[in-house]
Amino acid sequence: MRPCPCCEAEVTEPLLSTRPVPVQTAVLVKSLADSLAVPRRPIVLQHCPNCGFLWNTAFEAGLVRYDSDYEGTQAHSPVFRSYLSGLARQWLGALPQTPMRVVEAGCGQGEFLAELSHLSAAELQGFDPAYRGEGQARVTIEACELPDGDASADMVVNRMTLEHVFPPLPLLAAQASWLSRMGILFTQVPNAAHMLAAKLPGDLVYEHCNYFTARSLWHLLVRAGLAPQGLSIGYGDQHLTMSSAREGQAMAIPGRIPAGIVEAFASEMTQFGPRWGSLLAAERRAGRTPWIWGSGSRAVAFAAALPDPSVVAGAIDINPVRAGTYVPGSTWCTQPPETLKAGRSLTVVAMNPIYRTEIADRLAKLNCDAKLLAVGETSLAAAAPLGPFIGPGEI
Ligand SMILES: [Zn+2]
């Protein structure tokens, strides 16, 4: 029996098992040999019907490294930078008082703290073992895991971290220990309900051992001794954020995800790779050259899912740190956008549809003849990148 790590329901069920996928998806791999040597393991997902939580029961934390070769930033994209800036404004605006101290767990290279530094005079402190020490004005970052706190932070930021740690409760408890009496914890994770509803198998990556719905996150926050107070779904429905505090009334528990979408997602898992494989092979036969745009974790999942990844010429990424590195587990070398300059008969597949307009603009500026496709393209709310916080009882 595997009780749910979020809501403690005793009845949970196995959902799916993938074929072996690379265990490192955001690491900078500098040679083809190293890329092909990245270990592979299957993802074995367990599902909690009560709260919707999904987790990889075969996850081996020791296989995943978060050192200075870990490259998780999307901050080279104007779309993402604008989103991050809006997020900083929204979260600061949701605090009951002007913050004196802000702490971020898993802050990466400090891009969010840097946004806050333009908007707030608070002391800004971050922790991340992958920090490379590039330095940010007015921000102190230590290259280590979050230690236990001293209840002094008015704002604790937990952005895209909790999905990496199993079990998730101790990390959440460590974050709660930093909260002052009036302090607010903002917990942001990938939105599993969107992954399931939009059928996005590429969002299933080895480093993410946990997949949260609003209901599962609510349960986990309550178990960490916190009162969940607000919920926001943003970034084209891809991000789920909950605010919580040590005191105050908890918001109503979010509803369950619609029946059937978990099973539909599991079925899509088996069809996704072969379908894209046939589509890209047909593009090749028609004389076009497929490239993918975005060399992060979704690219790794995409390469691992294709029956024959050699149908793709390579990966494009706007992050200059990634140029010349390989999409882990594949033969795809990452190139800067200028590689496609004046290219003819190209088919470009965006790994994240939220960047479609940005990529189309870039291709036009490079004078490319390119057909642009996107993985998981649905009628995303691209015009509304950030949902408002919803008050108690309005879920
Ligand atoms: Zn549960």
Image (cartoon, rainbow, N blue to C red):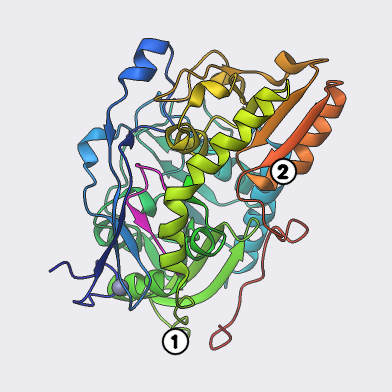
Q: Earlier in the sequence, mark 2 or mark 1?
A: 2
State whether residue 3 appears in this view. Answer: yes
Quarter of the image where the C terminus is located: bottom right
Query: Nearer the viewer's eye, disc 2 or disc 1?
Result: 2
> Image quarter for residue 294?
top right
Quarter of the image where the N terminus is located: bottom left
* Three-letter amino acid code at the position of disc 2: Val
- Whether disc 2's CB lies below 8 Å from ligand 1 is answered no
| C-alpha distance separating marks 2 and 1 | 35 Å
Residue 50 position (above or below residue 102): below
Q: Is residue 138 magenta?
A: no
Residue picked out by circle 2: 79
Residue 322 position (above or below residue 21): above
Residue 99 position (above or below residue 21): below
- Magenta residues, start to end: 204-213
Q: Is residue 177 left or right of residue 32?
A: left
Query: Where does the image place residue 224, in percent across and percent down from the top left?
Result: 29, 70
Residue picked out by circle 1: 249
Q: Main secondary structure of the magenta part?
A: loop
Query: Where does the image place residue 184, in percent across and percent down from the top left?
Result: 47, 67
Residue at 36%, 32% in the rendered image: 24
Residue at 21%, 36% in the rendered image: 62
Query: Where does the image place residue 330, in percent across and percent down from the top left?
Result: 44, 23
